[in-house]
């Protein structure tokens, strides 16, 4: 019997008939081998013809045969048909899954043995196992899909249980990204010099409202692709993916039901730590199955064979702990059976290395798209709810409550929600909208309770009436990621807030029946949300059982214990980036409480072993962050340091290198909000019981810390635009108007670049901007995305003086909207609408609105598309805006017609000052502000600049007509446009009609020789033209100058300059003809042409015609030697020709002058010529400079010169540069010292610059520099003879003269006979240690030698200093000289016989310890005394102690001994006792001191011990305890520390009490326990000096010490820097100061900043307490921020501080006017020596007062006014003050706000004692450097100049190098960060090692 029905009751033949068409297409694509095997299944008689016909390979024939095959089995018996279908499924590829499933289902599992022999003959030869392998594989696959369907349905039931409204994918909207721009956008803040240099691009462009699609449509066509859906936390991504899975389970949605739907959550994947294979991930972790391994293998095998039949949804990439990156290299596919880390599996899927062809859907936040760039095929932004959708949700929420009262409550809730910007912004996110509804329900119910707690409400103007928005179409706002805050919405174009008026207020008043008050900040909203959650109880299904309407503070108190644990959990989660918490993380009662209150959501997690466990997360990430902020503000388990670390501003610019975080970066916002006084009551209730301490005091301290951190950010001037906006949000949260003032105080213009702006952003800006009052602030929205509703809110920003809109996104509609609000900006001064899409329509809109802004001074509409029509309405504004000064209209596709129109306006509007056009790029109109009050001033004529225009004859005619109608013009510049001859002649024709006072410029205009000839006629034809300058060679230049508007031009000098024009003699003739008779020509320049001798002859021929000529320059014209004869003839024939300059050097020079002077260079002068020349010059009685540079001076010529030299009384300067070729010649010229008594300086160097200068009378002192000669043997003797007979020398420089040791010794032997008053420089003479000893011997043999400074290595320095005073201290300084033991022995011998006191300085000489000991033994100090310092790197730690001990053991004459860093200091004197021992900052540890004990105990006269800044520890304290009893005369002990330690002071305190002789004590940096403080109070009253700076102590311990200070009646010095004083300690300090009248030195730096909110009153109290301190000599109050009131209080004390010598007041907010008051008050402090006022706000007023006051304070030696705001006028005033400061040694003008410091630099010449000058960070240029070069030789003691971070170029640096040659005392000039390249800096450093270009 024929079995026609298969196992699934479907007729197999019918199935084949139904699917024949699709099977035909499939079989046509198979290989011929497969087709042949299927043909073989037919009986031989039926298949023979087919097999034979198959040899025909045409596709049509094959198709026909396949049709025959299918037709045969369609009518065959069922068994044969089943066999055929089974074989076909096994053999064929690319059969769709749904078709394969149907065929296999119809064919059945078994292939029954049939009796038909024909069928048996045609069966496939495949084994049965391979024939039947697909059927069970498909069945297992379908069974797994069924299990996945069940899992997803169960998941959806669980997820949808608490939904308020139904989720419909067709109502969810997505904006598709339209551009794929993956570029890194680093968040860097430029320095003040480059702030505008680079700004990142805007965020991702996700299209407009018109391009939005539904989520269902967005996912259509995603098969086989990687699709990314982005949205912020709470936007519903996870819910939508669950809904997508549920729809797939029901055969709906965009994902085909035939695909396997794999939904993986990254938060679940995070717990999988061990490597997994793909099958384990799918069958163990996703939906576990209990199938056999064979069945699992079949499922995976099917998946691998058909990857396109799977859809993988990867949800929440932002929560993944790892980072996915694109695989750029082509690598092999991953092995799916190989266990891999989860991150590698996911990366393999995304990079198509696993299951290539599968469908992938990834959800994440916007910032994470960068990670997926290059892997994603499609990206869409999930759009948030608009106002209508929010209202619908609110209505559903309250409808779900189930009774009419709640429905009414819902209406009121909707009214409140749309009236609050914060709530409306939150509600655009579904998750936060739910929280908002809970909050509103709580607030509304609370408002019914009379005892309800009120929260400050928002401005009533922002209320919106319900129903108005219902008339509008639904609009969608975009949502951006946590970089904009988890709650922040992003809105698309075309949307506006319903009911909102143009000024940002709302059309209708608030609803009359609603009394609930809306929180005014986001933080207060979340505080209310927390109260709302705590006030309700949920049953297990999430329904409200009841709602508690207690006060917020009462609710917090009721649940404070649970909140304490929850906030701690939240904080730990934030720290560890953890959002899922397990049972072991939380106590069970808190879990139940949190679920019941709705604070927790329960999440099922599948562990690695496949088990399901419960985990918990907060309802929203922002709620966790808020609770974490609560923890920070109420608990001391979060340190201040940790808080500072977490407090930072986020940026909206995304970069690949940003630190990944799962949170929304809202923590700092909540911290700022909680620092507001409005939140203080709630915080106090929590702080008392949540682990915090101190209640109100603790909260106040934390709030102060947050506000201080915010203050620093407000004062920072290097924040980028996104961070500035974030700062505004933070300040708004804090509700602190003083902080808002600081934001705009630091940055008058808020630059918000390249970010998307929202109305709540504008609202935050308004809070900040409105704090400036009338000062005004600017807003720069360059490249920002801003929708029209932002403009509705913008008028809330008052006092705006500058608005900038620069983006192509801004067009006519935006301009029209802007025009409607512009009249509200009454203080607007500058408007920029550039780089936009504005046309004439938009320009007209703006032009109609701007007259209502009367203060506008500048309009910038450049880079738009206004064209000529758009220029005209803007031009009409010129007369309507009385203060307008600048209009920019460039790059607007305008033509010369627009320019002519603007020029035409000049005739009717005389205030136009300049019209500037540069091709199509620039068009600027400048307008002057003239009034009747200015009528007496000189009128400034306007200028017109039309550059790079395309001129035609007609264009020039139109322009000329316009110019002729204009009033007087100053300059007309038409450079850059090609002028042919006709066009030029048109200009020349009209030129006499122009009223031009200065000149016309026609550079780079293609002028030809014909044009040149035409122009020269103007000097004769146009009386007003007085100067014509033409250059035809590049760069081509033409300038026509006019007589300045003078009517009478007779006798006016005229100039013709035709340089570099290629003139030939024939051209010259044409020029003379064109020039005609021009009797007024005074200057003619035809240099650099091709005139030759013929041209020069023609030039001389016309001399008689030039009656008033003064100078002719014919240089560089290729004339030969014949020119000398011609010029000589002219000199004889022309009586007016008095001077001719001729030279043959690189530049041929021929200059004819008609005035007196002599110059001869580049010539070979014979001795006879020299005599003739000089005799002629003797007759000259006026100022004379003789230039003999580049002349070959023979010895005889020099001798003849010296003979005549005394008679040349008018000679002031002799230049012989590059004219001396030998040492002999140089020595001959040195003889001028003996020949003429007027010589002031001699500077000679062969083949280099060389000068001799003279005075008009006998010189008092002379400077001599003779370098780079060969002064060996007789040459040195000759020089010494000359110098010995010569006059007194101030200095002698013999450096680089090859003297070597022998020459130096000869010089030193004769030194005593030379008359030198300042120094001798013998550097770079090849000196060795032997020569060093000879130079050192000069200290012994020369009475007038005061010091020797030697360095033998790289610097090769040797300077001998002289003095005019006897018995002074003599100094020997030896550095980097590699001294050996023998050298030290010899030096000891020399020093021992030197009669004067000696100071020895050895640095880096590789000295060994035993050498130092031997040197010390050999020294004979006698009664004159020695001081010695030895600096070696090894003198540290234990070696330092050992060396000190050995020195004390070896010498009994040591008076004081000290080791500081790596330097040993000794002072020795015969018959003296040791009085001082110091080991300071040299890495000594306490146990090292044991070896000193016996030595110290043997020194009873010791008065001072200093072991500061080492690591003494308990061992060091014990050492001191052991030696103090044996030191009865010890008066001073210093043990300052870098690291706080309680043990040292505690151990030492009792010993200090017993050491009754101690009067000076330094314990800075230590930690003082309460017990130690109590003991120390017994010794403090006897002290005369006390240093407790940087100490740490408890409040009670510190109070004890400070109160005891009142008993220190003899205290003269007190230092309490950087102490943390509370209010009580501060009051105690003030009381103590009132009692200590003996104070001479008081240092209280930075203590005021630690006093908290009461800082102002505390400062005034402390200042008032200083009233009785009449003996004050030194006071430091740095960092007090005392401001005006504090300065006024301080200055009251100055009249009685008559002995004041030093005052330091940095960082005290001293204004310019108060600075003047301070200076005036200091007049009474006549002994003042140091004045430190850095980092304030001093300006020109203070500087002017300095000029008056500092002249009377003659003892000033140090002046520091760095980091102030002094301008150019202040610089001039300051220079006047400096001229009077004869004792000044150091001046610091770092960053004073002006680069014009030349007057200051020049004034330093009046300060002979100056040692240190600091002018860094002022942008000073070469002029300042050159002024310093002039001053440096006059300041003989100058050691250091700091010029870092200026604008000094190579030329300035080279000038400094040259100046250093005559300034051996200068040790360093810092030039870091100047305009000198690295290569050039290295070159200059090698040339002069004292130049420092590094940052250190």
Image: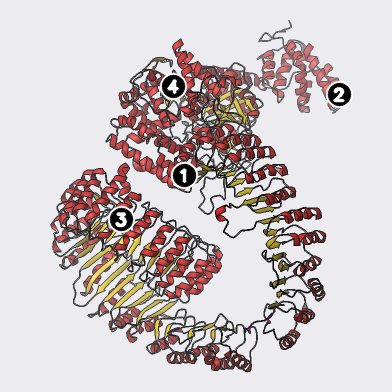
Horizontal side, residue 1066 vs residue 1277: left or right: right
The question of residue 1439 being in magenta is answered with no
Figure check: 320 above or below 1638: above
Q: Nearer the viewer, residue 1679 or 537?
A: 1679
Q: Nearer the viewer, residue 932 or 1544?
A: 932
Q: Which residue is mark 2?
A: 53
What distance separates the C-alpha of mark 4 from that of mark 1? 35 Å
What distance separates the C-alpha of mark 1 from that of mark 2? 91 Å
Which-is-in-front pick, marks 3 and 4? 3
Considering only order in the chain, which callout, 4 or 3, is on the residue closer to the N terminus? Answer: 4
Q: Which residue is mark 4?
A: 440
Q: Which residue is mark 1?
A: 744
Which-is-in-front pick, marks 3 and 2? 3
Does the image show residue 1497?
Answer: yes
Does the image show residue 306?
Answer: no
Residues at marks 4 and 1 touching, judged by CB atoms closer than 8 Å: no
Which-is-in-front pick, marks 4 and 1? 1
Q: Secondary structure at mark 3?
A: helix
**Viewport quadrant of the C terminus:** bottom left
Horizontal side, residue 1388 vs residue 1223: left or right: left
Residue count near mark 3 (Cα–Cα under 10 Å), binned few <14, some 14–19, many ≥20: some
Residue, x 86% and y 24% (percent of image)?
53
Region in magenta:
1136-1164
Figure check: 1752 above or below 1392: above
């Amino acid at each position: 019997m024929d079995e026609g029905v298969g196992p699934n009751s479907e007729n197999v033949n019918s199935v084949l008939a139904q699917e024949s068409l699709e099977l035909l297409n499939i079989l046509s694509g198979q290989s011929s081998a497969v087709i042949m095997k299927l043909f073989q299944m037919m009986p031989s008689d039926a298949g023979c013809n087919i097999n034979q016909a198959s040899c025909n390979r045409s596709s049509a024939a094959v198709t026909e045969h396949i049709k025959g095959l299918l037709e045969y089995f369609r009518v065959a018996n069922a068994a044969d048909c089943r066999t055929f279908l089974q074989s076909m499924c096994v053999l064929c590829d690319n059969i769709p899954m749904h078709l394969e499933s149907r065929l296999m289902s119809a064919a059945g599992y078994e292939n029954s043995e049939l009796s038909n022999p024909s069928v048996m003959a045609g069966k496939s030869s495949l084994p049965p196992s391979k024939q039947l392998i697909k059927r069970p594989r498909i069945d297992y696959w379908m069974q797994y899909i069924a299990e996945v369907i069940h899992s997803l349905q169960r998941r959806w039931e669980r997820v949808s249980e608490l939904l308020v409204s139904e989720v419909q994918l067709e109502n969810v909207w997505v904006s598709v990204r339209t551009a794929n721009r993956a570029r890194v956008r680093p968040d860097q803040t430029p320095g003040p010099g480059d702030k505008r240099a680079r700004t990142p691009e805007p965020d991702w462009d996700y299209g407009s409202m018109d391009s939005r699609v539904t989520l269902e449509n967005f996912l259509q066509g995603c098969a086989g692709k990687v699709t990314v859906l982005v949205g912020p936390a709470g936007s519903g991504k996870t819910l939508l993916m669950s809904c997508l899975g549920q729809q797939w389970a029901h055969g709906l949605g965009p994902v085909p039901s035939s695909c396997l739907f794999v939904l993986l959550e990254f938060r679940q994947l995070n717990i999988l730590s061990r490597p997994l294979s793909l099958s384990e991930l799918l069958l163990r972790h996703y939906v576990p199955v209990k199938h056999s391994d064979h069945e699992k293998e079949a499922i995976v095998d099917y998946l691998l064979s058909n990857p396109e039949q799977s859809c993988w949804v990867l949800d929440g990439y932002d929560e993944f702990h790892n980072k996915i990156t694109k695989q750029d290299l082509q690598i092999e596919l991953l092995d799916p059976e190989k266990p891999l880390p989860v991150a590698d599996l996911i990366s393999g899927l995304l990079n198509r290395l696993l299951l290539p062809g599968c469908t992938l859907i990834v959800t994440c936040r916007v910032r994470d798209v960068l990670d997926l760039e290059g892997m994603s095929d499609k990206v869409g932004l999930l759009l948030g709810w608009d106002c209508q959708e929010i209202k619908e949700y609110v209505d559903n929420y309250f409808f779900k409550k189930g009774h009419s009262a709640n429905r009414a409550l819902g209406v009121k809730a909707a009214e409140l929600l749309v009236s609050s910007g914060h709530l409306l912004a939150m509600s655009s996110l579904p998750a936060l909208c739910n929280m908002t509804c809970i909050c509103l329900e709580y607030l509304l119910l609370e408002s019914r309770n009379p005892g309800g707690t009120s929260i400050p409400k928002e401005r009533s103007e922002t209320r919106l009436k319900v129903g108005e928005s219902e008339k509008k179409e639904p609009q969608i706002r975009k949502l951006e990621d946590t970089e904009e805050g988890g709650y922040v919405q992003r809105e698309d174009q075309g949307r506006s807030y319903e009911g909102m008026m143009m000024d940002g207020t709302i059309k209708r008043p608030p609803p009359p029946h609603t009394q609930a008050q809306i929180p005014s900040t986001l933080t207060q909203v979340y505080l209310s949300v927390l109260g709302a959650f705590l006030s309700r109880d949920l049953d297990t299904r999430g329904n409200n059982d009841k709602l508690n309407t207690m006060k917020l503070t009462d609710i917090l108190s009721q649940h404070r214990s649970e909140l304490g644990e929850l906030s701690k959990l939240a904080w730990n989660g934030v720290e560890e980036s953890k959002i899922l918490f397990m049972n072991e993380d939380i106590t069970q009662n808190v879990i139940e409480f949190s679920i019941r209150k709705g604070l927790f959501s329960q999440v099922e997690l599948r562990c690695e072993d496949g088990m399901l466990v419960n985990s918990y997360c907060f309802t929203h990430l922002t709620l966790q962050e808020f609770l974490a902020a609560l923890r920070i503000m109420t608990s001391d388990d979060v340190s201040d340091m940790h808080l500072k670390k977490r407090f930072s501003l986020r940026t909206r610019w995304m970069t690949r290198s940003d630190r990944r975080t799962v949170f929304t970066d809202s923590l700092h916002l909540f911290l700022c909000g909680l620092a507001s006084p409005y939140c203080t009551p709630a915080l106090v209730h929590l702080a008392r019981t949540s682990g915090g301490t101190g209640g109100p005091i603790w909260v106040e301290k934390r709030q102060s810390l947050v506000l201080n951190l915010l203050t620093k950010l407000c004062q920072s001037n290097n924040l980028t635009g996104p961070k500035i906006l974030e700062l505004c949000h933070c300040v708004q949260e804090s509700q602190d108007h003083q902080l808002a003032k600081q934001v705009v105080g630091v940055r008058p213009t808020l630059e918000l670049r390249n970010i998307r702006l929202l109305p709540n952003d504008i609202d935050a800006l308004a809070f900040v901007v409105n704090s400036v009052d009338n000062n005004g602030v600017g807003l720069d929205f360059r490249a920002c995305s801003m929708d029209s509703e932002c403009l509705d809110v913008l008028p809330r920003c008052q006092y705006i003086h500058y608005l900038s809109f620069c983006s192509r996104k801004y067009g006519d509609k935006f301009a029209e909207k802007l025009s409607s609000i512009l009249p509200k900006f009454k203080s607007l001064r500058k408007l920029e609408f550039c780089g936009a899409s504005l046309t004439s329509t938009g320009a007209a809109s703006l032009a109609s609105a701007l007259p209502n802004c009367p203060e506008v001074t500048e309009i910038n509409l450049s880079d738009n598309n206004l064209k000529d029509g758009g220029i005209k309405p803007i031009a009409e504004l010129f007369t309507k805006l009385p203060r307008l000064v600048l209009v920019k209209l460039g790059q607007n596709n305008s033509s010369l017609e627009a320019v002519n129109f603007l020029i035409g306006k000049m005739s009717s509007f005389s205030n136009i000052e300049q019209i500037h056009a540069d091709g199509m790029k620039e068009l600027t109109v400048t307008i002057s502000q003239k009034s009747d009050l200015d009528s007496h001033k000189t009128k400034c004529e306007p200028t017109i600049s039309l550059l790079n225009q395309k001129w035609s004859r007609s264009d020039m005619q139109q322009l000329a007509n316009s110019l002729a109608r204009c009033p007087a013009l100053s300059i007309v510049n038409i450079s850059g446009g090609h002028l042919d001859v006709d066009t030029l002649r048109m200009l020349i024709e009209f030129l006499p009609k122009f009223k031009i006072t200065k000149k016309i410029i026609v550079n780079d205009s293609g002028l030809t020789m014909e044009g040149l000839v035409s122009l020269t006629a103007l000097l004769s034809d146009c009386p007003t033209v007085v100067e014509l300058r033409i250059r035809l060679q590049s760069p081509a230049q033409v300038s026509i100058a006019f007589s300045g508007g003078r009517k009478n031009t007779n006798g006016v000098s005229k100039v013709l300059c035709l340089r570099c024009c290629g003139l030939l003699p024939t051209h010259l003739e044409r020029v003379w003809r064109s020039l005609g008779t021009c009797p007024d020509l005074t200057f003619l320049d035809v240099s650099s042409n091709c005139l030759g001798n013929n041209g020069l002859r023609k030039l001389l021929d016309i001399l008689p015609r030039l009656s008033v000529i003064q100078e002719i320059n014919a240089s560089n014209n290729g004339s030969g030697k014949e020119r000398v004869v011609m010029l000589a003839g002219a000199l004889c024939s022309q009586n007016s020709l008095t001077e001719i300059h001729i030279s043959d050097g690189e530049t041929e020079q021929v200059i004819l002058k008609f005035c007196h002077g002599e110059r001869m260079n580049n010539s070979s002068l014979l001795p006879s010529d020299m005599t003739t020349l000089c005799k002629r010059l003797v007759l000259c009685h006026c100022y004379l400079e003789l230039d003999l540079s580049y002349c070959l001076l023979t010895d005889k010529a020099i001798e003849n010169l010296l003979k005549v030299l005394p008679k040349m009384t008018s000679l002031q300067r002799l230049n012989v540069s590059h004219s001396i070729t030998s040492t002999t010649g140089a020595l001959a010229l040195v003889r001028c010292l003996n020949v003429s008594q007027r010589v002031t300086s001699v500077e000679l160097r062969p083949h280099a610059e060389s000068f001799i200068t003279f005075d008009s009378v006998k010189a008092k002192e002379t400077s001599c520099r003779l370098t780079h000669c060969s002064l060996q043997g007789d040459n040195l003797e000759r020089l010494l003879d000359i110098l010995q007979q010569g006059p007194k020398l101030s200095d002698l420089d013999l450096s680089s003269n090859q003297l070597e040791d022998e020459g130096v010794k000869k010089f030193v032997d004769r030194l005593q006979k030379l008359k030198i008053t300042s120094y001798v420089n013998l550097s770079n003479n090849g000196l060795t240690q032997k020569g060093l000893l000879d130079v050192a011997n000069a200290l012994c043999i020369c009475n007038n030698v005061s010091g020797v400074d030697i360095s033998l290595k790289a610097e090769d320095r040797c300077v001998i200093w002289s003095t005019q005073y006897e018995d002074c201290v003599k100094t020997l300084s030896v550095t980097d000289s590699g001294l050996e033991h023998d050298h030290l022995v010899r030096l000891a011998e020399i020093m021992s016989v030197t009669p004067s006191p000696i100071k020895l300085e050895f640095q880096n000489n590789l000295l060994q310890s035993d050498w130092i000991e031997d040197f010390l033994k050999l020294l004979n100090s006698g009664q004159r005394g020695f001081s010695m310092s030895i600096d070696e790197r090894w003198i540290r730690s234990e070696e330092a102690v050992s060396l000190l001990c050995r020195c004390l053991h070896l010498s009994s004459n040591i008076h004081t001994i000290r080791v500081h860093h790596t330097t040993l200091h000794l002072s020795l004197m015969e018959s003296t006792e040791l009085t001082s021992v110091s080991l300071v900052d040299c890495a000594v540890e306490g146990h090292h001191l044991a070896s000193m004990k016996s030595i110290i105990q043997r020194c009873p006269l010791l008065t001072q011990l200093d072991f500061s800044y080492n690591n003494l520890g308990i061992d060091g304290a014990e050492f001191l305890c052991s030696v103090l009893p044996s030191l009865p005369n010890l008066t001073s002990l210093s043990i300052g520390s870098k690291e706080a330690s309680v043990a040292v002071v505690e151990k030492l305190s009792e010993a200090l009490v017993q050491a009754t002789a101690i009067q000076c004590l330094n314990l800075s940096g230590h930690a003082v326990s309460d017990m130690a403080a109590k003991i120390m109070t017994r010794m403090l009253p006897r002290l005369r000096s006390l240093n407790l700076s940087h100490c740490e102590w408890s409040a009670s311990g510190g109070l004890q010490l400070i109160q005891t200070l009142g008993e220190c009646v003899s205290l003269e010095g007190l230092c309490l820097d950087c102490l943390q004083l509370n209010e009580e300690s501060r009051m105690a300090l003030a009381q103590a100061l009132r009692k200590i009248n003996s104070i001479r030195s008081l240092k209280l730096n930075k203590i005021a900043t630690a006093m908290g909110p009461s800082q102002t009153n505390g400062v005034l109290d402390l200042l008032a307490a200083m009233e009785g301190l009449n003996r004050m000599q030194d006071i430091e109050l740095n960092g007090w921020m005392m401001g005006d009131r504090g300065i006024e209080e301080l200055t009251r004390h100055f009249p009685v501080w008559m002995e004041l010598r030093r005052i330091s007041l940095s960082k005290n907010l001293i204004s310019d006017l108060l600075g003047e008051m301070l200076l005036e008050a200091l007049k009474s402090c006549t002994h003042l020596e140091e004045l430190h006022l850095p980092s304030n706000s001093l300006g020109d007023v203070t500087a002017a007062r300095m000029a008056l006051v500092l002249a009377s304070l003659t003892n000033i030696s140090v002046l520091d006014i760095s980091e102030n705001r002094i301008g150019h006028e202040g610089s001039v005033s300051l220079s006047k003050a400096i001229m009077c400061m004869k004792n000044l040694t150091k001046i610091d003008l770092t960053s004073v706000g002006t680069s014009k410091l030349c007057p200051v630099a020049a004034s330093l010449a009046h300060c002979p004692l100056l040692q240190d000058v600091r002018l860094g960070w002022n942008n000073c240029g070469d002029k300042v450097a050159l002024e310093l070069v002039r001053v440096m030789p006059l300041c003989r003691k100058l050691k250091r100049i700091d010029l870092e971070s200026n604008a000094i170029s190579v030329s300035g640096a080279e000038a400094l190098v040259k100046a250093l040659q005559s300034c051996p005392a200068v040790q360093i000039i810092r030039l870091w960060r100047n305009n000198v390249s690295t290569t050039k800096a290295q070159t200059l450093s090698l040339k002069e090692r004292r130049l420092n270009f590094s940052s250190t």
